[in-house]
């Protein structure tokens, strides 16, 4: 994608803190089918660990850094930039493709991206980076918080339309190590790498009856980055999944499988375990928004899945920005 074919938007430059808040489509569907959404107790690996593949690679990367490199891209675990969320920013100035890194170090960073992704997700994220930024993967940046192998740590990759994390469960009760972002700057829905997720979400809307659609469809979406975890005492927009029929719930379940499919199994398992602890599928609400209907075809391009421990805000217009926040909030 050339710069002229991308659609920029003001939200690309809005930042949100944690507190405030390729392959064809068929490949993603196949990957999604392999994910057990709700399984019996004791069969879920609740989270990645410091010994997981991605985290082992993070440790190798950290140990490869010189003292001067560490001064530039390594920080304490509680540094505020670890929690910052933005669809278009660089967590440090040093780009992956610059002379700041040796080729072996670039390969380790690429391996981390591969390790935190499914096979389809890795191909999709790499293509998105190639199309969304001059220099592709090399235009993105990483930082390491904490010391791998010695207490809590997390590697964070940021750039245009992507935030990825590897934390070895250093952030307890938080899927993916914290809120994440993904998207794609292609304005044509049929060419957007994540439009297949909107198609899947809209199978739920299509299955609703007239009264249910009145509950699910809303005129205007909340700000895209407003994805705080609200816990059990809050109210959520849209239709309650717990009030749906069994076949409608199955479509919601399949939608969750599809949107989680780009990520590694360990992070998916943790996300699903947290969803279950937050009350499961029946505690979720699903909302669709009339705002941003790109073709006026009532295939709603902006939608949201939200419950006590789960927020997935998908903004498909003018191009895709998606904010994800999955974790347990302690109600007071």
Image: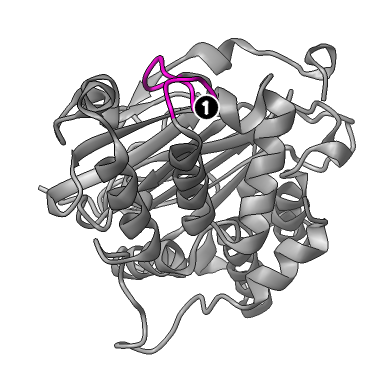
Scheme of colours in the image? one colour
Instruction: Indicate left or right for 62 with 121 as reference.
Output: left
Q: Which residue is mark 1?
A: 140
The picture places residue 74, in percent across and down from the top left corner, at 23, 29
30 within the magenta span: no
Residue 291 visible here: no
Front residue of 320 and 108: 108
Write down the region rendered in magenta.
90-101
Residue found at x 45% / y 23%: 86
Query: Quick check: 203 above or below 288?
Result: below
Front residue of 256 and 332: 256
Residue 201 visible here: yes
Residue found at x 27% / y 51%: 59
Pointer 1: residues within 10 angstroms few (<14), some, or many (20+)?
many
For numbered disc 1, what is the local secondary structure? Answer: loop
Name the chief secondary structure element in magenta: loop
Instruction: Indicate left or right for 139 with 84 as reference.
Output: right
């Amino acid at each position: 994608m050339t710069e002229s074919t991308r659609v920029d938007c003001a939200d690309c430059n809005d930042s949100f803190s944690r507190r405030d808040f390729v392959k064809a489509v068929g490949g993603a569907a196949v990957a999604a089918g392999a994910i057990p959404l709700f399984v019996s107790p004791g069969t879920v690996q609740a989270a990645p660990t410091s010994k997981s593949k991605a985290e082992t690679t993070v440790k190798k990367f950290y140990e490869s850094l010189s003292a001067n490199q560490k001064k530039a891209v390594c920080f304490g675990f509680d540094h505020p930039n670890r929690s910052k969320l933005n669809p278009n920013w660089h967590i440090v100035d040093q780009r992956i493709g610059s002379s700041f890194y040796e080729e072996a170090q670039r390969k380790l960073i690429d391996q981390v991206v591969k390790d935190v992704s499914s096979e389809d997700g890795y191909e999709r994220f790499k293509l998105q980076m190639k199309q969304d930024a001059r220099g592709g993967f090399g235009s993105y940046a990483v930082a390491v918080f904490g010391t791998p192998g010695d207490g809590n740590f997390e590697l964070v990759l940021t750039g245009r339309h992507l935030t990825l994390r590897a934390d070895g469960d250093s952030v307890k009760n938080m899927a993916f190590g914290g809120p994440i972002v993904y998207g794609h700057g292609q304005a044509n829905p049929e060419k957007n790498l994540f439009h297949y997720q909107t198609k899947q979400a809209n199978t739920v809307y299509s299955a609703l009856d007239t009264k249910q659609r009145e509950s699910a469809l809303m005129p205007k979406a909340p700000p895209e980055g407003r994805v705080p975890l609200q816990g059990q005492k809050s109210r959520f927009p849209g239709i309650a999944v717990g009030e749906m029929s069994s076949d409608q719930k199955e479509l919601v379940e399949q939608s969750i499988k599809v949107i989680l499919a780009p990520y590694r199994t360990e992070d998916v398992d943790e996300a699903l375990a947290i969803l279950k602890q937050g009350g499961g599928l029946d505690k979720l609400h699903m909302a669709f928004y009339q705002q941003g209907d790109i073709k006026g075809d009532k295939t709603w391009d902006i939608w949201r899945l939200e419950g006590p421990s789960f927020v997935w805000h998908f903004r498909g217009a003018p191009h895709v920005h998606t904010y994800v926040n999955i974790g347990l909030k302690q109600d007071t």
